[in-house]
Image (cartoon, rainbow, N blue to C red):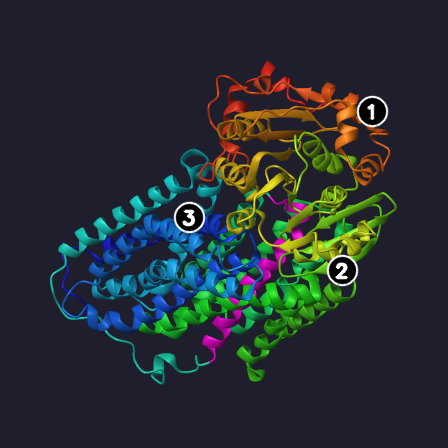
């Protein structure tokens, strides 16, 4: 029952493909940027990530289901393109409304306790859902709306969903790479959102223009009852679609946990992993469309499930650290499984819906429901209890069951038996012989303590003063006097006795312990719960410190802690986790963070900011942000190696002499300073620090004006400027050569 139209069938299909290509591009741009903005507003933790992804996917599911249910009656006598255009306008509006909603939510939540408090978790989840859901509903509705348009135009067929799905995946992959590789660096987060909104509006305008060329006619057909011949034998497919969504998103969480040591924790690493996932999905969808167009019988769902059972375990087998930590090796291991799912998912929806928008909306909603629950189950159930390797093996089990169920014993063939045997062999190898980076680390010492929680896998190893702390396989810190100086240097510069101090990022707890030696009220803030649990391994007196009411460790995002606390401190010391280019690390280096820290310092208080080895431009952006907030900034090279201590205050910072330092430091603090032999004495410390100072003005490039802000995280996004330098082959200038990365004498 098609509407009489003023354009051809091919025009309608090409238009729908382009619309969905752009829609997929915008959707992934929004997801990437909204998640990053949510971290800044609600805290950097797994709960925020899980809620954002769940609400995003949940909105897609509900929008797909509701859109498919109501488009038949809504588009009666009018083009479905009008509703598609309206949905695109609503999506574009989210680019402007969501940041405002996040800012308002942040202010409302400051009184709800730390990030692990039940009141905060419930309230933040509610406000996140309220902020994101309307726009995600509109995204989900675009699928049935576009399918209804194709049916009206006489351009629809039983493969309409897979046709649009292919375009959406291509757009999603392009959006992921564009946002990570150049959009955010060039335009900032808000500028990137506005660009995506402009593309949404352009799509909406194009759709509305096409709608004006449609002559009013009959409404699209509504879906037939599930018992119709077209749907016979497909009752199990919603269950299979749920499983594919559940396992794929759960595995993605496990892949990130397992392969962080190989891929790193930079923005580009995560974007590359997601792009590989989407690229393989694109290839699988294209293969399915090719089989349909070529008149070949598409692969059966049962056989595809068998292949999925085999390939789901490849990342475990090929990610064995004994094979070598090769990035390409790991990424290649992900592609076969993602290829199969890219083929299987649109195949199942096409078979279930037969081109009907309502049935396609319901079927796709089942898949997205699995995408919602998969990350939650992996983050809070499987990974903390079993680890990444076992989680991947467990998530492969449903395909071992589905393969024979979907094939049917009567249709069982030799190839199916071979697939079952290969899957069983991979399962045995993955669970019985393969090792995982989840527990193995790059240290010469075997793990002494291995803890897992929803945020990370934490490994503590070593003995004596040769100990290491790893999170998700990456070295976080070592037992080094540098972390002691992070406490003692700003404390000796105070002109009055300190009363309260804050340590942002606990790590091994060395800085926290050194602060406690001053006998003042000390609060440490740590993001990963398991890091707090290994404090006693690195410092045997740690548990005794925590029993003292003057000293406490709070599990929270450090920036959010400063936002919600009403206290003011004499010293705030910040030691962000390495590397300086790590994802979301700019939230502890930005202008907005320094404004917040300044508001939490007492008059004459000092901020100590540790800046490790990193890109020169990023360091200059951080220093420029500091100088833009604090009138007085001093810089000191690290005592033992690469890195710099920045001290910042509203008042002049004076480094005292040996006699004054001795008078200001309690005996316990003096003993702590020389505990590990560097410096060997208080005199060496007092005489050595002036020689380590670097003139702040000499560190800045006078020809560069950019600083590091929440909207422009220069340290995290750097590819474009590095490419420009490489293309122009610009050598490092004299300012760059003066950065204090040389070891101390």
Residues at marks 3 and 2 touching, judged by CB atoms closer than 8 Å: no
Q: Nearer the viewer, residue 608 or 298?
A: 608
Q: Is residue 68 above or below residue 730?
A: below
Residue 11 shown left or right of residue 518 in the figure: left
Q: Would you say residue 307 is visible in this rendering?
A: no
Give residue 719's mark: none
The earlier-in-sequence mark between 1 and 2 is 2
Q: Position of residue 115 (x, y in %)?
A: 56, 58
Q: Which residues are magenta?
A: 236-265
Q: Main secondary structure of the magenta part?
A: helix
Q: Position of residue 111 (x, y in %)?
A: 49, 57
Query: For mark 3, what is the residue?
Result: 29
Q: Secondary structure at mark 2?
A: loop
> Does 653 appear above or below 90?
above
Q: Quadrant of residue 292?
A: bottom left
* Number of numbered callouts drawn: 3
Q: Is residue 633 above or below residue 703?
A: below
User: Would residue 399 appear left or right of 231 to someone viewing this image?
Assistant: right
Residue at x 75%, y 44% (from the top left corner): 510
Quarter of the picture holding the C terminus: top right
In whole angstroms, how far apart are the C-alphas of marks 3 and 1?
53 Å
The residue wearing badge 1 is: 684
On the image, numbered disc 2 is attached to which residue?
A: 434
Viewer-nearest of labels 3 and 2? 3
Label 1 or label 2, whichever lies nearer to me, is 1
Q: Is residue 259 magenta?
A: yes
Q: Is residue 153 magenta?
A: no
Q: Quadrant of residue 155?
A: bottom left
Mark 1 is surrounded, within 10 Å at the Cα level, by few (under 14), some (14 to 19) or many (20 or more) other residues, namely few
Q: CA distance from mark 1 to mark 2?
A: 51 Å
Residue at 51 percent across and 65 percent down: it is 119
Which comes before the other along the chain, label 3 or label 1? 3
């Amino acid at each position: 029952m098609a509407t009489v139209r003023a354009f051809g069938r091919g025009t309608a299909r090409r238009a729908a493909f382009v619309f969905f290509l752009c829609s997929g591009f915008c959707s992934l741009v929004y997801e990437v940027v909204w998640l990053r903005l949510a971290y800044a507003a609600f805290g950097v933790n797994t709960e925020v990530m899980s809620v954002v992804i769940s609400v995003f996917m949940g909105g897609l599911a509900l929008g797909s289901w509701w859109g498919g249910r109501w488009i038949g009656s809504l588009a009666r006598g009018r083009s479905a393109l009008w509703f598609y255009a309206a949905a695109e306008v609503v999506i574009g509006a989210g680019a402007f409304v969501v940041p405002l909603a996040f800012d308002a939510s942040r202010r409302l939540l400051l009184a709800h306790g730390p990030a692990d408090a039940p009141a905060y978790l419930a309230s933040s989840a509610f406000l996140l859902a309220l902020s994101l859901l309307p726009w995600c509903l509109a995204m989900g509705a675009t699928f049935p709306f576009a399918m209804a348009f194709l049916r009206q135009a006489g351009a629809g067929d039983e493969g309409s969903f897979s046709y649009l799905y292919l375009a959406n995946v291509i757009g999603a992959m392009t959006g992921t790479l564009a946002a990570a590789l150049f959009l955010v660096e060039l335009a900032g987060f808000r500028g990137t959102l506005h660009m995506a909104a402009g593309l949404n509006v352009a799509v909406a305008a194009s759709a509305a223009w096409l709608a004006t060329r449609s002559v009013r006619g009959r409404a699209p057909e509504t879906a037939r009852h599930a018992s119709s011949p077209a749907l016979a034998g497909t009752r199990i497919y919603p269950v299979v679609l749920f499983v594919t969504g559940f396992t794929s998103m759960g595995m993605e969480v496990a892949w990130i946990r397992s392969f962080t040591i190989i891929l790193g924790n930079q923005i580009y690493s995560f974007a590359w992993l997601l792009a590989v996932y989407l690229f393989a999905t694109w290839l699988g969808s294209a293969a399915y469309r090719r089989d349909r167009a070529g008149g070949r019988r598409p692969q059966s769902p049962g056989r595809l499930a068998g292949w999925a059972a085999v390939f789901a375990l490849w990342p475990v087998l090929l990610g064995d650290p004994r094979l070598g930590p090769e990035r390409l090796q790991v990424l290649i291991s992900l592609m076969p499984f993602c290829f199969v799912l890219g083929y299987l998912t649109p195949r199942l929806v096409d078979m279930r819906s037969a081109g009907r928008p309502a049935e396609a909306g319901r079927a796709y909603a089942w898949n997205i429901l699995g995408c919602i629950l998969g990350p939650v189950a992996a983050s809070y159930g499987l990974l903390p209890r079993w680890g990444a390797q076992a989680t991947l093996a467990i998530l492969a089990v449903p395909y071992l069951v589905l393969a024979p169920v979907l094939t049917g014993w009567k249709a069982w063939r030799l190839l199916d038996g071979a697939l079952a045997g290969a899957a069983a062999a991979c399962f045995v190898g993955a669970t019985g012989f393969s090792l995982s980076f989840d527990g193995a680390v790059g240290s010469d010492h075997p793990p002494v303590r291995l803890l897992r929680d929803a945020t990370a896998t934490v490994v503590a190893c070593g003995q004596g003063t040769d100990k290491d702390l790893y999170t998700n396989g990456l070295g976080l810190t070592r037992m080094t006097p540098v972390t002691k100086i992070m406490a003692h240097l700003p404390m000796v510069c105070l002109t009055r006795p300190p009363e309260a101090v804050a340590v942002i990022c606990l790590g091994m707890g060395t800085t926290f312990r050194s602060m406690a030696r001053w006998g003042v009220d000390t609060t440490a803030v740590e993001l990963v719960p398991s890091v707090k649990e290994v404090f006693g391994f690195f410092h045997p007196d740690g548990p005794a410190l925590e029993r003292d009411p003057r000293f406490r460790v709070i599990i929270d995002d450090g920036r959010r802690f400063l936002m919600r606390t009403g206290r003011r401190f004499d010293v705030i010391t910040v030691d962000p986790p390495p590397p300086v280019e790590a994802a979301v690390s700019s939230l502890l280096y930005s202008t907005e963070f320094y404004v917040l820290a300044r508001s939490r310092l007492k008059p004459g208080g000092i901020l100590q900011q540790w800046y490790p080895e990193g890109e020169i431009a990023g360091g200059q952006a951080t220093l420029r942000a500091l100088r833009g907030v604090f009138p007085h900034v001093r810089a000191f090279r690290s005592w033992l190696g690469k890195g710099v201590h920045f001290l910042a205050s509203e008042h002049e910072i004076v480094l005292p002499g040996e006699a004054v330092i001795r008078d200001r430091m309690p005996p316990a603090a003096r003993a702590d300073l020389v505990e590990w032999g560097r410096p060997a004495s208080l005199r060496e410390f007092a005489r050595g620090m002036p020689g380590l100072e670097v003139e702040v003005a000499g560190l800045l490039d006078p020809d560069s004006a950019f600083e590091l802000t929440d909207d422009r995280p220069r340290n995290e996004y750097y590819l474009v400027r590095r490419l420009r330098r490489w293309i122009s082959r610009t050598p490092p200038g004299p300012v760059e050569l003066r950065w204090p990365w040389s070891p101390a004498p």
